[in-house]
Image (cartoon, rainbow, N blue to C red):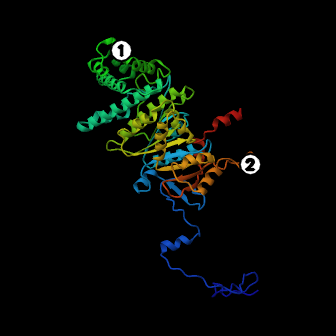
Amino acid sequence: MISIAENAPVPRAWGWPVRGGGRAGHVEPGARFAGTTSQVCGLFPFAVSSGADVHGVPVGRHMHTAEPVGLDPAGWLRTGLVSNTGVWVQGQPGIGKSSITKRMLVGLVGFGMRAIVPGDVKGEYTPLVQALGGAVWRIGRGLNALNPLDVGPLAPALARATGTEDARLRETVRARRLALLEALITIVRRTEPTVTERRLLGAALDTAVDAARRMEPVVPDVLAALVAGGPALHAIAASTDTAEYHRTTRELANALGLLCDGAIRGIFDRPSTVHVDLDSPALSLDISALDADDDDVVAAAMLCSWAWAAGFVDAAGIGERARNVVQVQDELWRALRVAPGLVEQSDRITRLGRHRGIVSFQVTHSLDDLEALPTEADRAKARGMAARNGVLLLGGMAGSELDGLRRITSLTDGEAALITSWAAPPTWHAGQRHPGRGKYLIKSGQRMGLPIALALTPTEQHLYDTDTAFRQAAAT
């Protein structure tokens, strides 16, 4: 055994001359490169960085480089990476769309935003909102009511406003009320109001608001004002006598009557019992009690919830304690497919008077939902809504979905293959983890996508679980 000298801690170029020492017969000289310390340090651990930003909500690790990836639409907007803060989430059921959406919601609340989930059809966000210390309002018959004409969260701001700000807020409230009434009428009779009917509706709304004074008007008040008529209403209808006026307004009056006496009676025809604390970190309008009702009822509930949430967003951005808002719209297309024109109406309701301070998540299973809308005009507008989102979170889906996706964003062959590989297990062996569970591709603009794998904490696994009904059935 040859001993190694203490004063020779570094092996010779050919290696240590010992048994098993890996001595080489020839050693080629190494290539020398010059570079700055910020560049050369990237050679270790000999992996090429994806360029992903680690700042933001941690949504997982890059599947190729194991880098942590952060997502913050508001931060990306400030740094010029995106032009808007909308996030489109798409993937087949069961791959974890709601999980990554909830992770983002929790993280953005942690960054100081307020969260609102308007029209939670399944009630799946209720445990999370409660865990965040927020408020959950259940809407339905015998539960809480949501008045479509309620000023809602904007009431304190209206009480304080003066001058031009007061006039601006009142016009915003009127326009939103009118847009929501037109949308509800479209739902109950499957056609949009005519130009004359829209003017009649506006005049009747103004009459009902004036009569209510400090109280909030309700839909029956608008119906009563329309039936009673008056000089302004008669002039719009171009009626010379009462009988002719009633014939002209009969269809509109009956549509308003259906809002009071039809399938949605008792839900949106009475004063609101929903109240808001703008200091609350999160709020949910849970309409899961209506999930088994006809699409008309669910659509009306979702539109009313969106309008109320739009007021919440406006109110959150006013005052000394203004904060941005993160909003989640799930099952979006269930409302929009009920009748022609609802895409335009919903866009007016949710965007009207809103300042730039909201991160919105729109969640869907398939772009086929867009094709289910009643008219080509609606479908084109809906595709535009999807394309305007600055960020796309794509989970596993079938190859047939990719043609539609390529209308919204560019996909390389490798990205497309990755998405379809997450769609289904490759074998029939049971007990294996689904290959797409917790895996997503983050796309924005024409950049290469970031494939990430999300790992949930034990607390998240409990709060985000949407398969409890099947486990409970199996246990019994």
**Residue at position x 42%, y 49% from top?**
84
Helix, strand or loop at label 2? It is: loop
**Residue corresponding to mark 2:** 427
Query: Is residue 332 at all visible to an observer of this figure?
Result: yes
Estimate the x, y position of residue 290 in percent, counting from the top left: 53, 27
Query: Is residue 277 at all visible to an observer of this figure?
Result: no
Estimate the x, y position of residue 445 in percent, counting from the top left: 48, 54
**With respect to residue 308, does 450 lie above or below?**
below
Q: Amino acid at mark 2?
A: Thr
**Residue at position x 72%, y 81% from top?**
22
The residue closer to the viewer here, 136 or 432, is 432
The residue closer to the viewer here, 99 or 222, is 222
Estimate the x, y position of residue 63 in percent, counting from the top left: 60, 58
**Residue corresponding to mark 1:** 246
**Pointer 1 and pointer 2: residues touching (CB < 8 Å)?**
no
**As drawn, is 234 to the left or to the right of 446?**
left
Q: Which mark is residue 256?
A: none
Q: Residues within 10 Å of mark 1 (few under 14, many from 20)?
A: some
- The residue mark sitting in front, 1 or 2, is 1
**With respect to residue 371, does 272 lie above or below?**
above
The residue closer to the viewer here, 180 or 277, is 180
Q: Amino acid at mark 1?
A: His
**With respect to residue 115, does 289 lie above or below?**
above
Estimate the x, y position of residue 234 in percent, counting from the top left: 29, 18
Q: Residues within 10 Å of mark 2 (few under 14, many from 20)?
A: few
For marks 1 and 2, the one nearer the N-term is 1
Q: Quadrant of the N terminus?
A: bottom right
